[in-house]
Amino acid sequence: MSAPPPDPSPPASGLPSSEGNEPRIVEAADLVDEITDTSSLRVISRLQRNGHEAYLVGGCVRDLLVGLTPKDFDVATSARPRQVRRLFPRNSHIIGRRFRLVHIRFAGDTVIETATFRGEPAEATAEGDLLIREDNTFGTAIEDARRRDFTVNGLFLDPDSERILDWVGGLEDLDAGILRTIGDPEVRIPEDPVRILRAIKFATRLGFHIEDRTWRAMCDNAHELERSAPPRVLEEILRLLRSGTALGAFKKMRHCGVLKILLPDLDKHLGPHGDQSEADHKRAESFWRLLEALDSAVHDGYEPTTATSLALLYHDIAECEADPKTRRAKGDPPEWQKVTGEVLEHLIGNARLSRRDSSRARKIIFQQRTFSRPGGRRFRPQVFCLSEEFPEALELFRLRCEARGEGWDIYKAWEERYESASSADPEDIADEKKRSRRRRPRRKRKPKT
């Protein structure tokens, strides 16, 4: 995949030409009519009635403008966190340390994230170090707009006046299908390297071109992701896998060097860039087809769990590490169960993965061979089907069958066994478990003569 073609660049200042102290204002009565979340409107109304500025901001405004249904409606306000808390004393609480904001809860598990306008962050602790470690410097609406990551995410919508306020040129870039940072990308990307993953997510999800300077900054600063909080990075990777555009996202991650930094084992598994051997090409194509199958399933409503997502990323690596001919690690391959833990060890330590998710991911990978090669005499299919992680393992097997274009009859057979086991009499299952635990009597050895 080649780098995105250059798009119109901002002036030397790094700010879009339409940016200034006065916003571009666009009437948005039709857009307000499409807002289905009344809770966010109630939050804004109460804040405004009490003398505070308040707007819908970020992704919800962007999605409404491009015809998508927003998943969340976030609010930005001039009110400080404690002021917001006092206005919603029964259903709100302040969260965050690096970035303090208020979660306001409503019926039906609706949460409206309400953040105070941010100003310029405090200076970095070391000369030349742009990484933001704390972002609780409060400011004005204009400053807050300029502090956001990308121009298309810097739009403010006032439901009361039914107007969009644009201080950053986001409307122009939405019309042109361009994703660019607000300000100099060589500053904005190192400030928060996770913006690299967010740029990839938005570009693939919206079908936008990444502006040339922004793309170069992403490539040049990919290594800075090592300094970001591992759980936050893992969460962004999981969002990419669940986005329905995982194939395009992971190819962009590989092309700009992010995959090598965050998932080095996977990057190595896919082989070198450019000229590849036949074996490298085959491994890479197998993985890309698996992501393509995942995207198709997500479009049909499937949402992979964390454990299934990790198993999907590392299954093929485990298969290679279990084969003496393709193994990269030192020594002969251990048994299949140990290999599954071996390949996940690096990720578990670096991403601070929970024991539950890491254990389930190992079991999901381990069980893949059972689908094609069930065990011997003591193997009990019903007991296997009722193991806790079986549904996730079966989902991964289905995706692998779709990716390879083979094994579908085997998948359907296991699906029928699972349905049968789920409706079986509990006493029969208990008896089956007992039989599976019984040990065959050992044969007596003949005495040596």
Image (cartoon, rainbow, N blue to C red):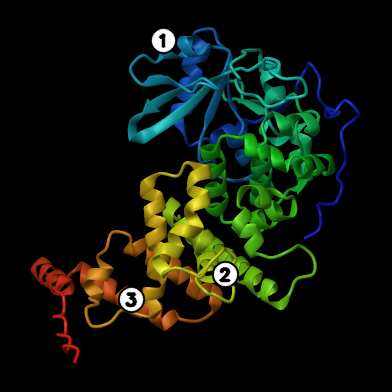
Which residue is the site of mark 2?
327
Horizontal arrangement in the rendering, residue 429 relative to residue 177 (left or right):
left
**Residue at image x 88%, y 41%?**
8
**Separation of marks 2 and 3 at Cα, in angstroms:** 30 Å
The quarter of the picture where residue 241 lies is bottom right
Checking the image for residue 414, the label placed there is: 3
Picture coordinates of residue 257 (x, y %)? 72, 50
**Separation of marks 1 and 2 at Cα, in angstroms:** 60 Å
Residue 126 or residue 291, whichever sits in front:
126
Q: If you read the primary sequence from the N terminus, does the residue marked by circle 1 or circle 2 appear first?
A: 1
Horizontal arrangement in the rendering, residue 336 relative to residue 129 (left or right):
left
Helix, strand or loop status at disc 1: helix
Which residue is the site of mark 1?
86
**Residue at image x 22%, y 78%?**
378
Which amino acid, mark 3? Answer: Trp
- Discs 2/3, front: 2
Helix, strand or loop status at disc 2: loop
The quarter of the picture where residue 192 lies is top right
Picture coordinates of residue 2 (x, y %)? 81, 58
Q: Tell me, yes or no, if residue 305 can be seen here.
A: no
Checking the image for residue 365, the label placed there is: none
